[in-house]
């Protein structure tokens, strides 16, 4: 379930809840149930801009939330199709219109991935990268790109970063793996050795080790492995300040290390699962 649904029901006068008219279905209850009786027209105005979601029903503001502050909503997509549902009987819609808005990042944040193409990134060592419905897809990667002196295929930012908070979501296919690369000083060589690599694998429930999700390759074993099974989205937050690197996966602290190997470099995403697919979305960064 990637997006969200604003609920419509014949429930005039019913007490507001997670499944009543105006709710973000099973996520956020409306302040009021402003629906009219069956047979009368209702007017919705739905505002989506970055993490901010506002819903008006018949002129009354009934929902105003920041998706970043709602656990189950924060991982939902912020780019995609608009749709209309019909479950039972007859439903009518009219005067459907939309106004697209610029999407400013939250204060002091910048989106590294624009949800449309790979502008701002550079492919290193091959591999295929595609963008579809706001999702960055890593396809057809190679474990060593034909050169044992180099790591697998990867995608790097155009510029280098020093101190920052990086947030993104990723989703693995069954049996796949990837890595988030940090402070990689140059393209040549193995970025997991010249910079840092946060290892991410399809290993939900596995006992933490140097080869499980959350490990910093060659440097740190995660405290826990809070990753979700293949096919589900995971949230990652990485804070790099000076020699200290802290990692959270799905809001759980997994790694906190101090190391002086590299203080500045590219941010990268690995494409290293031949025949598998790895997906990323909502990639954003705040420089410190």
Image: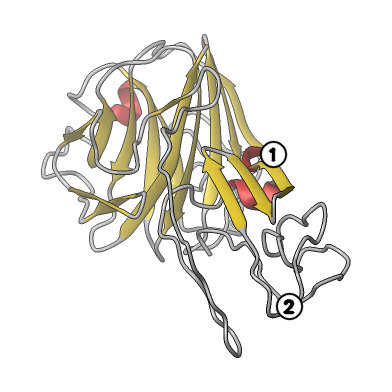
Q: Which residue has dot 2 on it? A: 10
Drawn side of residue 68 relative to residue 279, left or right: right
From this view, report whether residue 71 is shown above or below residue 52.
Answer: below
Instruction: Kindly tell me whether residue 38 is visible in this rendering.
Output: yes
Q: Residue at x 46, y 58 (%)?
A: 202
> At numbered mark 1, what does the secondary structure look like: helix, strand or loop?
helix
* Residue under the point 63% across and 51% down: 73
Question: Which is in the foreground here, disc 1 or disc 2?
Answer: 2
Q: Quadrant of residue 195?
A: top left
Pick the residue in front: 83 or 234: 83
Q: Residues within 10 Å of mark 2 (few under 14, many from 20)?
A: few
Image mark count: 2
Q: In terms of depth relative to the viewer, which is nearer, 241 or 102?
A: 102
Report the residue at 78% width, 57% height from top: 29
Corner quadrant of residue 37: bottom right
SS state under label 2: loop
Q: Is residue 184 above or below residue 4?
A: above
Name the spot of residue 81 as percent of width and height, x first: 41, 60
Q: Is residue 217 among what the camera can see?
A: no
Question: Badge 1: few (under 14), some or many (20 or more) residues near its Cα, within 10 Å?
Answer: few
Decide if residue 113 is on the left or right side of residue 121.
right
* Marking on residue 69: 1
């Amino acid at each position: 379930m990637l997006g969200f649904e604003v609920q419509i029901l014949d429930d005039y006068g019913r007490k507001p809840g997670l499944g009543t008219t105006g709710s973000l279905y099973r996520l956020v209850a409306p302040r009021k149930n402003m629906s009219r009786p069956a047979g009368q027209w209702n007017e919705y105005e739905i505002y989506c801009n970055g993490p901010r979601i506002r819903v008006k029903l018949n002129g009354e503001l009934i929902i105003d939330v920041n998706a970043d502050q709602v656990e189950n909503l924060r991982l939902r997509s912020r780019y995609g199709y608009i749709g209309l549902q019909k479950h039972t009987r007859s439903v009518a819609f009219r005067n459907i219109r939309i106004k697209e808005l610029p999407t400013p990042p939250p204060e002091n944040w910048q989106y590294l991935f624009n949800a449309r193409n790979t502008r701002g990134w550079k492919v290193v060592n091959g591999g295929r990268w595609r963008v579809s419905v706001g999702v960055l897809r890593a396809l057809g990667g190679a474990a060593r790109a034909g050169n044992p002196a180099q790591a697998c295929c990867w995608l790097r930012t155009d510029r280098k970063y020093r101190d920052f908070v990086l947030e993104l979501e990723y989703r693995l296919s069954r049996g796949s793996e990837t890595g988030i690369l940090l402070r990689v000083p140059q393209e040549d060589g193995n970025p997991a050795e010249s910079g840092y690599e946060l290892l991410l694998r399809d290993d939900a429930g596995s006992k933490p080790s140097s080869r499980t999700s959350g490990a910093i390759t060659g440097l740190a074993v995660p405290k826990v492995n809070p990753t979700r099974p293949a096919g589900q989205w995971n949230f990652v937050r990485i804070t790099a300040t000076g020699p200290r690197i802290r990692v959270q996966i799905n809001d759980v602290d997994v790694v906190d290390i101090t190391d002086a190997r590299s203080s500045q470099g590219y941010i990268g995403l690995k494409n290293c699962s031949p025949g598998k697919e790895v997906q990323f979305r909502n990639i954003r960064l705040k420089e410190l």
